[in-house]
Image (tube, coloured by chain):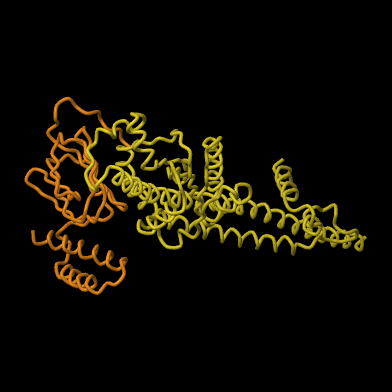
Chain colours: A yellow, B orange
Amino acid sequence: MAMAALRKEGRRLVLSSNPSSFARSAVFSEESCPFGARSVSTQIVRNRMSSVKNIQKITKAMKMVAASKLRSVQTRTENSRGLWQPFTALLGDAPGVDVKKNVIIAVSSDKGLCGGINSTTVKVSKTLFKLTSGPEKETKYVVLGEKGKVQFLRDSKKSMELSVTELQKNPLNYTQVSVLADDILKNVEYDALRIVYNKFHSVVQFIPTISTILSPEVVERESESGGRLGDLDSYEIEGAETKAEVLQNLTEFQFSCMMFNAVLENACSELGARMSAMDNASRNAGDMLDRLTLTYNRTRQAAITTELSEIISGAAALSH
Amino acid sequence: MKARPPTPASIPSKLTVNFVLPYRSEISSKEVDMVIIPATTGQMGVLPGHVATIAELKPGVLSVHEGSETTKYFVSSGFAFIHANSFADIVAVEAVPVDRIDPSLVQKGLADFTQKLSSATTDLEKAEAQIGVDVHSALNAALTG
């Protein structure tokens, strides 16, 4: 009974391997061994076993690297979470605000092999694009990270205003992010900036999140009309000459702070996703290796048995 | 994020302060007696029940008064929001406790930037040197005063 189950496992493995290469599948199925051949060569299985073992080593190493990087990034991310809270307390979060010029900033990673976090960002951004676009409206993308850029190039090339890659070459710091935020503000016209990123929750859980930053004009309009930001009118404003000037400084500062938190959260999610993806890959490679070892041993044993029975039956024939 | 309470009818006895930096939350929801904020319009003392204000910060000393204890930070720049419910949020780009500043380096930096300001030719250089001089003289004032 157990043998039958194991044989089934072995058969499934044959099916899952590339069916077009005859040589490879021939190794596993005994029916297709050449006529008259005594035993099947186990060379190819051995090669495959060693390659699977190597892949497992690589994925294990990648998991270790991601885990060790994650620890430092996670602390920094958690420390940066205080940064956006004062802005949200003051200005609130208004993802549903209806404005003409929307800029969607999609934060993705530069490297792959990190599960679905980049596709999630892209999917959410595209949905947001559909929601915000309409007659007399204009929505543009700003894409951070190589992987997101590739996905947007496929069908949204026209709406892509700007793309920035290799953000994470050095550890992320506020100066670098504020320069980036400045670059984005210089290059796009906006009424609302919407940052799409994956908020880190735990190593296996990321929440696609949208942060909305309104332009100074929209903030002023909303606060004067008593809309979402009605409370803002009750604040006394101290600083530069005019209210508009302070609001401009304020929203730009808010954008850089939100961006800082967003890129850190996304970097943290990326590492977490990579860690769990690589963990899965190592486990799969281990399972595959087990099945291959079983097939290998069984084939070898079958060959030995065949030879033994031939010798014994030969000897028996002679002795009579 | 924790929800903020509505504005109470009577003025509370303490001010709740959040003081955040990009890399750390220096003070988080701590109840203090008073903070003095270096706003661009001048030093601003904030007590519980202060009128709701948005203030830009300039390089200077932020002091937090709690009972008889006073903690002083030197902040580079940022924003302070004072809410009607006696909450004060201070967001700064960089801040250090004043006792960790090296006076000799401040003097050296001040001399360097003053010299740079006098020799600057382009507007950009001038502006950069001016910022350097401003920051260092504020640091100097923080240390001596």
Classify A182 as above or below A232: below
Corner quadrant of residue B45 = top left
The x, y position of residue A36, in whole percent, is 90, 60
Corner quadrant of residue A129 = top right
Q: Residue at x 52, y 42 (%)?
A: A139
Residue B28 in sight = no
Classify A230 as above or below B105: above
The x, y position of residue A65, in whole percent, is 47, 59
Answer with left or right where residue B36 lies relative to residue A48: left
In the picture, the quarter occupied by the C terminus of chain B is bottom left
Classify B126 as above or below A229: below
The number of numbered badges drawn on the structure is: 0
Answer with left or right where residue B48 lies relative to residue A219: left
Closer to us: B3 or A89: A89
Q: Residue furthest left?
A: B68
Closer to us: B7 or A10: B7
Residue B138 in sight = yes
